[in-house]
Image: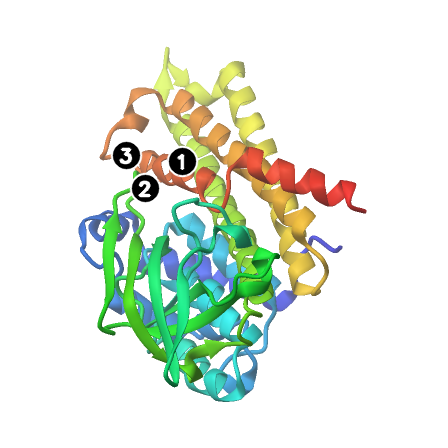
Amino acid sequence: MDMGLTEIQQMLKTSAQEFLARECPTTLVREMEEDERGYSDELWRQIAGLGWAGVPFPEQYGGTGGDFLDLAVLLEEIGRALAPTPYFSTVVLGGLTVLDGGSDAQKNDLLSRVTDGSSILTLAVTESSATFEAWGVEATATADGDGYALNGTKLFVPDAHVADVIIVAARTGQEGDPASGVTLFLVPSGLPGLEVSPIRIIGNERQYEVRLNNVRVPASSVLGEVNGGWPIAERAIQRGVAGHCITMLGGASAVLDMTVEYVKQRTQFGRPVGSFQAVQHHCAQMATDVEGCRGVAYQAAWSLAQDLPAQREISIAKAWISQAYRRVCSTAHQCHGAIGFTKEHDLQLYTRRAKVQELGYGDANYHKELALASIESE
């Protein structure tokens, strides 16, 4: 694998850095933490206008025909800026899942609205077990006339409060293999019986509980085949974990840059604190962790872009980055001292999100087990 970016990817990365530095300062991040919706309509319109929402989609749906590696370049910069947008849920979790399993009619309808930014999508898989395995899907979809009635509760659904369509995994069969009885449904917002409640988390990211109380949807809302939704959901989860790793990499890179700049300027005993060997060792360790994150994150993204089996690479990336990002933030606090813990300083914005992201999509121990199982099965 060539770890270097292509000329187009480098241009995309540079333009994204410049745009987000100009249009998404940390003042906006702080403002959106207190906002009920959690994102800026203006920033979302600008992002869609730049064509970012269409990067991984074919041109026939208004996209640019890129792959997951092109998408990763953008996700890294979004993670670096902590950009408050529904980009991840709409493009990574929603749009690519529709592209994977949708009918021609579903793709023509939804993906054109994803690429122009007029619709927000999200994915609802996890429930009270908090597992990302098929046996954790307990919500049910019962045949009801010419459609289905959905019942159950989904947890940790990002941007569900603003989503126009929620892709819901529900059980339509009770066969011996838990994976064989799962179906995906396109559930429009506002249907009777669909209730959304916020889940308060330390990072102030918008995650929600979605309750389905006899929500009726037509048969045309089935994404893929009845009882055949788990392979689509599993692939969506893999992309979600890999994209999550890339955004964590962006955050860790920002913390490193912030810390290096701070120790150059902060003086103590008549000299910059960055001139002390212990502080230099801290920064070197942080840089080592960030580059390690970059290697495993892009290895996972490349495997997905090449349509290769990627579970081992994805789990290795998540296991490493979950712990490395936390180490980077912890070391940054040692270099900053007390000021890094204050609400007025930007470091705490990243530290809070690092803790949430460490646990999101499975913690390090969970993914170490998956990686080991993948190796043993070869």
Residue for badge 3: 345
Q: Nearer the viewer, residue 207 or 16?
A: 207
- Name the residue type under label 1: Lys
At x 32% / y 28%, what residue is drawn?
Answer: 340
Q: Is residue 349 above or below residue 178?
A: above
Crowding near the residue tagged with mark 2, few <14, some 14–19, many ≥20 C-alpha atoms within 10 Å = some
* Residue mark closest to the camera, 1 vs 3: 1
In the current view of this chain or complex, which residue is farthest to the right?
A: 378
**Residue 290 appears in the figure:** no
Where is residue 305 drawn, in percent x and y? Answer: 66, 64
State how many labels appear: 3
At x 67% / y 48%, what residue is drawn?
Answer: 313
Q: CA distance from mark 3 to mark 2?
A: 15 Å
Q: Is residue 15 above or below residue 269?
A: below
Give the SS element for disc 3. Answer: loop
Compare marks 1 and 3 and give the one earlier in the sequence.
3
Crowding near the residue tagged with mark 1, few <14, some 14–19, many ≥20 C-alpha atoms within 10 Å = some
Q: Nearer the viewer, residue 258 or 95?
A: 95
Task: Report if the CB atoms under discs 1 and 2 are less than 8 Å apart.
Answer: yes
Residue for badge 2: 203
Compare marks 3 and 2 and give the one earlier in the sequence.
2
Mark linked to residue 166: none
Q: CA distance from mark 1 to mark 2?
A: 8 Å
Residue for badge 1: 355
Q: Quadrant of residue 348?
A: top left
